[in-house]
């Protein structure tokens, strides 16, 4: 079950880190997500899961500057998940992927249920959301993100929950079924 959930979330992770490597396509969101999860990042210096630094740069845990230098360009334009997030959550994804300054959303070190998760807090939150979906407890509401954010704080930043940037992106992806805001749940295989 753990392997399945890990594979399911990889597609979203690789999309959220567009500079970090190709992702594969598929007609069904879960199948595409599993295929992308098994792909290894191919960016220089392996930007995914660097434990809080790239080329010696520390994470900006205090959010002292507005994030710049990120983007929301899909690595796989045929992926419905990536296309949805680019269309509906571009601002949030670009902030998460920012390189100036780098933040825990895409670059923090996290654990989910005792296992290291590459790709920062957002990868951990997406893994948690996929597990909630496969377990049948995903509601498609902000409370899902709150539950997962509490399990996915980066070790570098020492908080008790994932950063605001991470939560903002996850909230956009999940949407709010009680308000008829679909987010990108269906496209990303997160079905309540």
Image (spheres, rainbow, N blue to C red):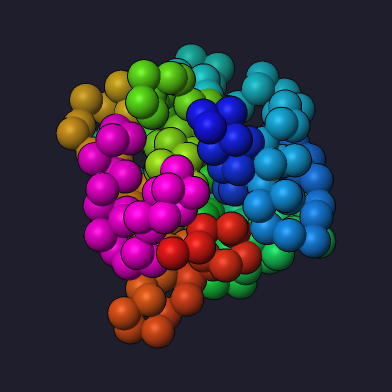
Q: Does the magenta stretch include residue 64?
A: no
What's the magenta region? 131-153
* Residue 159 in which image quadrant: top left
Q: In this view, does 38 lie to the left or right of 168?
A: right
Residue appearing at x 59%, y 59% in the figure = 188
Along the line of sight, which residue is nearer the eye, 143 or 155? 143
**Does 119 sit above or below residue 130?**
above
Q: Position of residue 81 (x, y in %)?
A: 64, 60
Q: Where is residue 8 in the image (x, y as percent from the top left)?
A: 60, 43
Residue appearing at x 68%, y 41% in the figure = 34
Quarter placement of the C terminus: bottom left
Residue extending farthest to the top is 56
Q: Is residue 96 visible?
A: no
Q: Is residue 135 left or right of residue 144?
A: right
Q: Can residue 25 be seen in this view?
A: yes
Q: Position of residue 42 (x, y in %)?
A: 76, 27
Residue appearing at x 47%, y 76% in the figure = 182
């Amino acid at each position: 079950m753990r392997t399945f959930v890990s594979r399911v979330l990889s597609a979203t992770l690789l999309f959220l880190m567009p500079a970090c490597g190709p992702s594969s396509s598929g007609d069904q969101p879960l199948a595409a997500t599993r295929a992308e999860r098994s792909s290894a990042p191919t960016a220089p210096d392996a930007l995914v899961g660097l434990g809080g630094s790239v080329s010696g740069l520390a994470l900006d845990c205090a959010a002292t500057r507005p994030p710049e230098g990120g983007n929301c360009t899909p690595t796989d334009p045929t992926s419905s998940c990536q296309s949805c997030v680019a269309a509906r959550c571009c601002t949030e994804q670009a902030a998460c992927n920012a390189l100036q300054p780098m933040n825990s959303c895409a670059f923090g070190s996290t654990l989910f249920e005792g296992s290291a998760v590459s790709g920062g807090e957002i990868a951990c939150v997406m893994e948690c959301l996929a597990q909630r979906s496969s377990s049948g407890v995903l509601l498609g509401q902000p409370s899902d993100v709150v539950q997962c954010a509490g399990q996915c704080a980066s070790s570098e930043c020492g908080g008790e929950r994932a950063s605001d940037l991470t939560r903002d992106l996850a909230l956009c992806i999940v949407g709010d079924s009680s308000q008829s805001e679909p987010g990108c749940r269906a496209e990303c295989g997160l079905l309540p």
